[in-house]
Image (tube, rainbow, N blue to C red):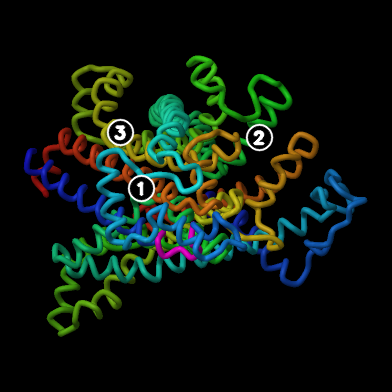
Amino acid sequence: MIRYTLKRFLSLCISLAVASLLIFFVIEIAPGDPASFMLGINAQPDTVAALRAELGLDIPKLERYLAWTQGMLTGDFGMSYTYRTPVSQMVADRLWVSLPLALFALALSTLIALPAGIYAAARRGQTGDVAVMSATQLGVAIPNFWFAMMLVLIFAIKLRWFAGGGFAGWDKGLGAVMWSLTLPAISLALPQAAILARVMRSALLDVMNEDFMRTARAKGLTTTQTLWKHGLRNALIPVLTIIGLQFSFLLAGGIIIEQVFYLPGLGRLVFQAISARDLIVVESVVMLLVFAVIVVNFAVDLAYAAVDPRLRART
Amino acid sequence: MNRNLIIGLILSAIAILAALMSFIWTPFDHVAMNIPAKLQTPNLTHWFGTDHFGRDIFSMIMVGARTSIAVAFVAVGIGMGLGIPLGLWAAARKGSYIDELIMRANDLIFAFPSLVIAILITAIFGAGAVNAIIAIGIFNIPVFARVVRGAAMPIWEREFILAARVAGKNAARISVEHILPNVLNLLIVQATIQFSLGILAEAALSYVGLGAQPPTPSWGRMLADAQTLVSIAPHLALIPGFAIIITVMGLNLMGDGLRDYLNPRTRVART
């Protein structure tokens, strides 16, 4: 297990290094100099040069890359070009919106999907199964931002149960925060729940065909007992993998939902930064999202190997 | 043919026909404004109503289908065009450094959610349908490479491949002549799924302003325009939403149906 972990860790480090190189240099070739953009078209060349020097844009690219990555490792993401505040501070502030949203959505998706998937598998081929599967078919086809608009229309505009957008702020307390994130989380969770329910159902159906399930039935357990005691435990492995992968997707997918609900999260930050050519902010947020995906994948791989020793042996 | 396949084909055909039809006929000019007729609910003249500029929504939906389908179609083409050769190559050189390199590069692309790729591309080249295609297309490459590699590897162990080798065929020729036809079914199913994901991705990108730019109509942008008007004219949001759902659901059902139909085992089991 130690060898496997080290090998995967090495691969994680390489992936992160290549990703950071890619992000930095791809963004650096972007047309449009941030300094000239900030000063407008009437700026004098020497003013632009002075601002470039102030922002550190006159330093060679490779040096800037090294400084950026070293800074990232110590939590210093550099200084925003437009706001002149540390990027790490801006990102941290926004994470307090985006992270709870992703976690809330993940919890909702899991809470909806697992019972639905188990129910469908237990009633394979019957009306309940068909109903759940049709609902998931619809769930994966609905764009989450459209669903979000519909939720706003019904629950914010017509019924007035929720606000149509905005974030309550942590100073108002956890309850208010959760309340303002409820509609965004539901809209983010729905398509994921549909995917997860399908995975749960098919994983459980696969396990139900195994010999040990027949043995469990043969020794006198009821169908429900077999399902809970033996089926579920084995079927959960692929399901946990998908749940892990969904987290990073929810973090990135939140970018769009934040637009619908005017939430001050990472998504809005990155869109504002793009239009202001605040490249260092764009680089840092994109790197953070990619970091989340790579690290979650690493954790999922390790968890998988811990549960299934055959995987360790194979690599 | 199974039920999923038939329903899927019908729903997808509606979207594709609407897109094709829009080249020769739409009930109204999709960009023509008619302010006195603005925000009409569906009626006999304007079947899907009108928007805040008095433009005919039915015509916009038809032309929007063109954008959605074209973007998703080309993006799938990019994914297949690059992903299939890479996957075949990786499978043919299984375990070699080429295989490792291709698969690690794939992992890396997977780490960038398609939306993040789109944001990066937009940050560099600006928003537009072409950049949306590239963003979605790049994300499709590892999907196809993986599917092909996974399906091709067991085929390489089969006896008819050994026979082809003995006959003097090289790896590239075997990949094209023997491996590819055997993984084609899987690829068709995957292409359908990626096509539907492409429609959703295009809508999302257009919604946040990173996709097709005005005056090119797109379902995603129609939804973005509808957002501020949704309380007074819900049909502005409902209709493009239904258009997306019907198309995506049609493609998904078609994918499921094709998987069963093209798999001889499930087909025999049914009959």
Q: Nearer the viewer, mark 2 or mark 1?
A: 1
Which badge, 3 or 2, comes first in the chain's sequence? 2
Which badge, 1 or 3, comes first in the chain's sequence? 3
Number of residue marks? 3
On the rendered image, what quadrant is the N terminus of chain A found in?
top left
Q: Position of residue B262 (x, y in %)?
A: 41, 60
Q: Amino acid at mark 1?
A: Met
In the structure shown, which secondary structural element does the residue marked by tag 1 occupy? Answer: helix
Residue at the far front: name it. Answer: A46
In the displayed structure image, the side of residue B166 where residue B246 appears, left or right: right
Image mark 3: chain: A
Q: Which residue is mark 2?
A: A150
Tag shown at residue B185:
none
Q: Give the magenta range.
A: A27-34
Q: Nearer the viewer, mark 3 or mark 2?
A: 2
Residue at the far right: name it. Answer: B36
Q: Amino acid at mark 3?
A: Leu
Q: Which residue is mark 1?
A: A287
